[in-house]
């Protein structure tokens, strides 16, 4: 007999199999000896009261043994099948390739960056030597931006597609089954590269192709139909379909589209700073106890404030995390954050950003659809100059920032290139700086431990999402003006994060498959 139950248990009950059976038995009014297994289906932490509880949805097997889960995938040989070009080996591109193979089509992925192993050397170079490789960095390379910046899987995009299928595909390629259960699943930067390699091997073993160090520099078009691409090394790749999944930082692709007069649009986005606190302070604030119960994970947080009708909010919060330098060109500073799977770093960091609306970009109107992109660049170049012309980031203590005071000293940071004291309150455009100041002052009354000079602001957080949208037909998913061009995921303005990008990649692959099935 199988019972579905919903209940709250202590962290100690949740962590111990027998204690959990006893708690479930009491809930069902049965003997613990009759319970063969408790299969958790959903798990979340409820820290709203002083006593932290674990909220569980589970299936309880009474006098019955559960079947073993099987996530194995049967792969077709598509080496001789019709081919489809994919620009970008991020989650959208990789999951599009998996879906094409499932449909009997051959994916050919063109990735400007390197494979995950070779990519590590370029990450070390930007952290230690402040050298930015414009084709291989935290944003570009196999696996995309998510590979080395965290692997968060939480998404609100459940209406866009089958989230469960994406998570099960990740499990099939080596992720823990825990991601199917947790309310806010997370893989971790230390584990995600191995999963990406497994996906690559599946694509190659099925007869697909992946070309690294292959940057697209031109599109071949004939009478508004896609015909192929030209790469930086002079090669041509022919095809009648291209899934354009190049990510939100591929500024050269946006520029190329504009130059070829392929329709693109400016869209709202957000920019600001990245804040870092001691993780112990966030744990105390969220769990109301110190030190944290070792059975509980490093505590996250999120917040939203309205400042004069404008949204100001936390973004991509990384418990037990590290701030990373995510520039994609020399002369700019971009910060982002990531966490290892155990989230055991002594710091917590998060983006703190301000919504930028299209009306705010009037001063860059001459750039048309690229107005937001230019605004991003201006902020990133300002940070680079304020940091001394290296990847050293300009920084300021939180309370000092709100009081317009230059910080006389700065605490330790996880940001490896280092930080230097700078008057961010003066350097940021008022639209961003003043909005952040007002939001922090409002938070000082609601989240008092958060508002402290132990917290340090790092400049700048500017790549929250694409400032450009590439339009597409809502039914065929093709660009409305170019037959065979499929704008996809974050870079096209249709996704945000690993899971939603993967879903969008699969949707584009399905749209192409329908044409040829």
Image: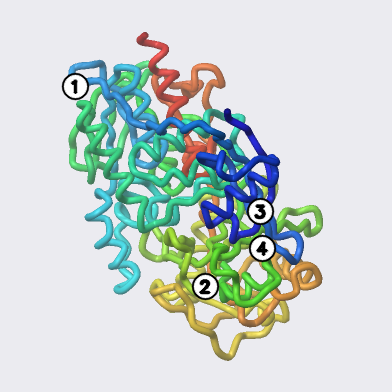
Q: Residue at 22% of width from left, 55% of height from top?
A: 118
Q: Position of residue 388 (x, y in %)?
A: 43, 78
| Residue 1 spot, x, y in % from top left | 57, 28
Determine which residue is flagged by label 2: 347
Give the Cα separation between the discs numbered 1 and 2: 47 Å
- Compared with 416, 148 (above or below) is above
Q: Are marks 1 and 2 in contact (CB under 8 Å)?
A: no
**Number of the front mark, 1 or 4:** 1
* Residue that numbered label 3 is attached to: 9
Q: Which residue is mark 4?
A: 432
Between the C-alphas of marks 4 and 3, the distance is 43 Å
Residues 433 and 194: in front is 194
Horizontal arrangement in the rendering, residue 48 relative to residue 178 (left or right): right
Answer with mark 1 or mark 3, whichever residue precedes in sequence.
3
Relative depth, front residue between 250 and 255: 250
Count of labels shown? Answer: 4
- The residues bearing labels 1 and 3 have C-alpha atoms spaced at a distance of 51 Å
Q: Secondary structure at mark 2?
A: strand
Q: Which mark is residue 449?
A: none
Q: Earlier in the sequence, mark 4 or mark 3?
A: 3
């Amino acid at each position: 007999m199988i019972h579905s139950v919903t209940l709250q248990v202590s962290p100690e009950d949740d962590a111990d199999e027998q204690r959990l059976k006893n708690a479930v038995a009491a809930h069902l009014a049965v003997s613990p000896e009759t319970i063969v297994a408790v299969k958790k289906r959903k798990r979340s932490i409820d820290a709203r009261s002083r006593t932290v509880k674990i909220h569980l949805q589970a299936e309880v097997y009474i006098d019955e043994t559960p079947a073993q889960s099987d996530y194995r995938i049967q792969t077709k040989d598509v080496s001789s099948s019709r081919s489809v070009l994919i620009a970008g080996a991020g989650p959208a591109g990789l999951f599009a390739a998996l879906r094409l193979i499932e449909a009997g089509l051959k994916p050919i992925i063109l990735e400007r960056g390197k494979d995950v192993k070779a990519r590590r050397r370029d990450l070390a170079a930007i952290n230690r030597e402040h050298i930015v490789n414009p084709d291989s960095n935290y944003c570009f390379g196999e696996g995309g931006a998510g590979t080395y910046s965290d692997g968060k899987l939480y998404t609100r995009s459940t209406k866009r597609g089958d989230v469960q299928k994406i998570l099960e595909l990740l499990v099939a390629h080596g992720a823990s089954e825990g991601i199917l259960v947790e309310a806010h699943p997370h893989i971790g930067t230390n584990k995600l590269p191995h999963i990406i390699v497994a996906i690559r091997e599946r694509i190659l073993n099925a007869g697909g192709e992946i070309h690294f160090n292959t940057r697209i520099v031109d599109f071949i078009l004939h009478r508004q139909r896609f015909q192929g691409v030209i790469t930086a090394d002079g090669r041509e790749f022919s095809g009648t379909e291209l899934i354009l999944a190049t990510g939100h930082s591929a500024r050269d692709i946006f520029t190329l589209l504009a130059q070829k007069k392929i329709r693109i649009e400016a869209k709202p986005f957000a920019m600001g700073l990245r804040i870092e606190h001691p993780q112990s302070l966030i744990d105390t604030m969220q769990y109301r106890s110190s030190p944290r119960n070792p059975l509980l994970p490093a505590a996250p947080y999120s917040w939203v404030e309205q400042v004069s009708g404008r949204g100001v909010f936390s973004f991509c919060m990384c418990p037990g995390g590290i701030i990373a330098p995510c520039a994609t060109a020399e002369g700019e500073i971009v910060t982002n954050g990531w966490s290892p799977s155990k989230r055991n770093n002594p710091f917590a960091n998060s983006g703190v950003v301000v919504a930028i609306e299209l009306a705010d970009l009037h001063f860059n109107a001459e750039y048309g659809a690229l107005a937001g992109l230019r605004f991003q660049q201006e902020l990133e170049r300002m940070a680079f100059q304020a940091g001394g012309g290296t990847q050293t980031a300009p920084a300021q203590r939180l309370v000092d920032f709100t009081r317009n005071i230059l910080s006389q000293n700065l605490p330790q940071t996880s940001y490896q290139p280092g930080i230097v004291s700078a008057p961010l309150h003066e350097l940021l455009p008022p639209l961003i700086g003043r909005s952040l100041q007002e939001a922090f002052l409002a938070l000082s009354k609601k989240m008092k431990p958060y508002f402290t000079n132990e917290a340090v602001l790092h400049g700048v957080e500017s790549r929250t999402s694409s400032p450009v949208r590439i339009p597409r037909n809502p039914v065929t998913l093709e660009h409305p003006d170019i037959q065979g061009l499929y704008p996809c995921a974050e870079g096209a303005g249709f996704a945000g994060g690993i899971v939603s990008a993967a879903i969008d990649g699969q949707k584009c692959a399905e749209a192409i498959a329908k044409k040829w099935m």
